[in-house]
Image (cartoon, helix red, strand yellow):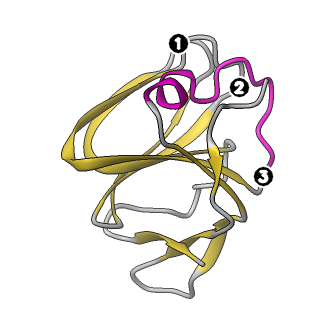
Amino acid sequence: MRSPAVALGVELRHEPADGEPRPLATDVEVADSLLAKGIGLMGRSSIPDEYALVFEFDEPATHGIHMLLVRTPLDVIWLEDDEVRRVETLPAWTGHARERADRFVELAPGAAEAVEPDDRVVLVE
């Protein structure tokens, strides 16, 4: 089942505080509607290593993520002004978390392994 998200045609890049920038994902989609945000990655049994689903919000606020009907673990990065606030791997089906952000990103498990708070994660054309 593919998410009703929109492909961006951009790269999601990790810019560590003390290292070389590297791509996190090259197949990037944005959940730009209430439906797309509600469905997210539900029903997926796997996520390609190069894939990211981006959730954008108008202003920073506390945003929650649930893993109900998500059949694979996900790495989640919460961002505020492109700065990493939190990184967590959520387990399939039962995971949930909340954090302040104006954007968060869902990735394949292990994709955000080197990402740490205070790093930057940006969308690059």
Q: Which mark is residue 49?
A: 3
What is the distance, in whole Å, between disc 2 and disc 3 at their CAs?
13 Å
Image position, residue 71 (x, y; %): 71, 18
* Residue 39 in magenta stretch: yes
Q: Are marks 1 and 2 in contact (CB under 8 Å)?
A: no
What is the distance, in whole Å, between disc 3 and disc 1 at their CAs?
22 Å
Q: Which mark is residue 3?
A: none
Query: Between residues 29 and 61, which one lies in front from this camera angle?
Result: 29
What is the distance, in whole Å, between disc 1 and disc 2 at their CAs?
10 Å
Q: Could you tell whether 107 is left or right of 45 in the image?
A: left
Q: Amino acid at mark 1?
A: Thr
Circle 2 — which element?
A: loop
Circle 3 — which element?
A: loop
Q: Which mark is residue 94?
A: 1
Mark 3 packing: few (<14 Cα in 10 Å), some, or many (20+)? some
First reached walking from the N terminus: tag 3 or tag 1: 3
Q: Amino acid at mark 2?
A: Thr
First reached walking from the N terminus: tag 1 or tag 2: 2
Image position, residue 44 (x, y; %): 75, 24
Q: Quadrant of residue 24?
A: bottom right
Residue at left 72%, top 65%?
26
Residue segment shown in magenta: 34-48
Q: Amino acid at mark 3?
A: Asp
Q: Which residue is mark 2?
A: 72
Work out which quarter of the rendered image holds the C terminus and state it.
bottom right
Query: Between residues 78 and 37, which one lies in front from this camera angle?
Result: 37
| Most common secondary structure along the magenta stretch | loop
Residue at left 54%, top 30%?
36
Mark 1 packing: few (<14 Cα in 10 Å), some, or many (20+)? few
Q: Are marks 2 and 3 in contact (CB under 8 Å)?
A: no
Residue at left 62%, top 39%?
5
Task: Identify whether 79 is placed above or below 83.
Answer: above
